[in-house]
Image (cartoon, grey):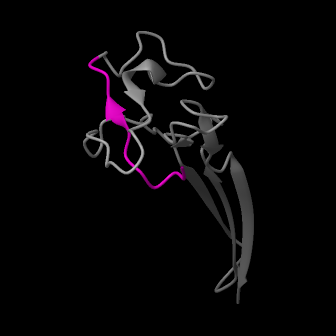
């Protein structure tokens, strides 16, 4: 069986009280459908983790006499470096079934300077 088939719903609750990256949802809520059948699980049954990212930029313009100006810009994405969890394995017969398997990009910082004359 490959990962393209839908699973069957067992009737158990899908959400966990305290999800973690090792167990994001109740894996007992789904089972492999019988061979030759299409499972009865609906779309978007498993709700993934939310994402909160804080981005920031600071700009300082320094006048060096007319018309010369030096601009310094610092830009940071994901300032607090919280891991954005982006992928959950929902393939019933997978070894990582029910686990978070992908993480988005972590903090990145860029510094830019511009001299205008």
Count of marks placed on residues: 0
Examine the structure image and report whether residue 19 is included in the region drawn in magenta: no
Which residue ends up furthest to the bottom in the rendered image? 117
Horizontal arrangement in the rendering, residue 19 relative to residue 14 (left or right): right
Which residue ends up furthest to the top in the rendered image? 17
Q: Residue at x 61, y 39 (%)?
A: 94
Horizontal arrangement in the rendering, residue 16 relative to residue 1 (left or right): left
The front one of 38 and 104 is 38
Examine the structure image and report whether residue 7 is included in the region drawn in magenta: yes
Residue 96 x/y as whole percent: 64, 34
Horizontal arrangement in the rendering, residue 22 relative to residue 64 (left or right): left
The front one of 101 and 86 is 101
Q: Is residue 49 above or below residue 87?
A: above
Q: Residue at x 51, y 51 (%)?
A: 3
For the record, the magenta segment spans: 1-11
Residue 21 x/y as whole percent: 60, 26
The front one of 108 and 12 is 12
Residue 41 x/y as whole percent: 28, 39
The front one of 1 and 83 is 1
Whether residue 104 can be seen here: yes
Q: Is residue 93 above or below residue 58?
A: above
Q: Is residue 61 above or below residue 22?
A: below
């Amino acid at each position: 069986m490959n990962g393209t088939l839908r699973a069957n719903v067992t009737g158990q609750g899908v959400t966990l009280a305290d999800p973690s990256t090792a167990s994001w949802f109740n894996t007992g809520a789904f089972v492999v459908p019988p061979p030759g059948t299409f499972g009865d699980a609906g779309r978007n049954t498993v709700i993934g983790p939310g994402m909160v990212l804080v981005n920031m930029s600071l700009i300082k313009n320094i006048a060096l006499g007319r018309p010369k100006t030096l601009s310094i810009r610092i830009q940071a994405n994901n300032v607090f470096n919280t891991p954005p969890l982006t992928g959950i394995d929902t393939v019933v017969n997978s070894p990582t079934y029910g686990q978070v398997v992908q993480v988005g990009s972590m903090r990145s910082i860029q510094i830019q300077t511009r001299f205008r004359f």
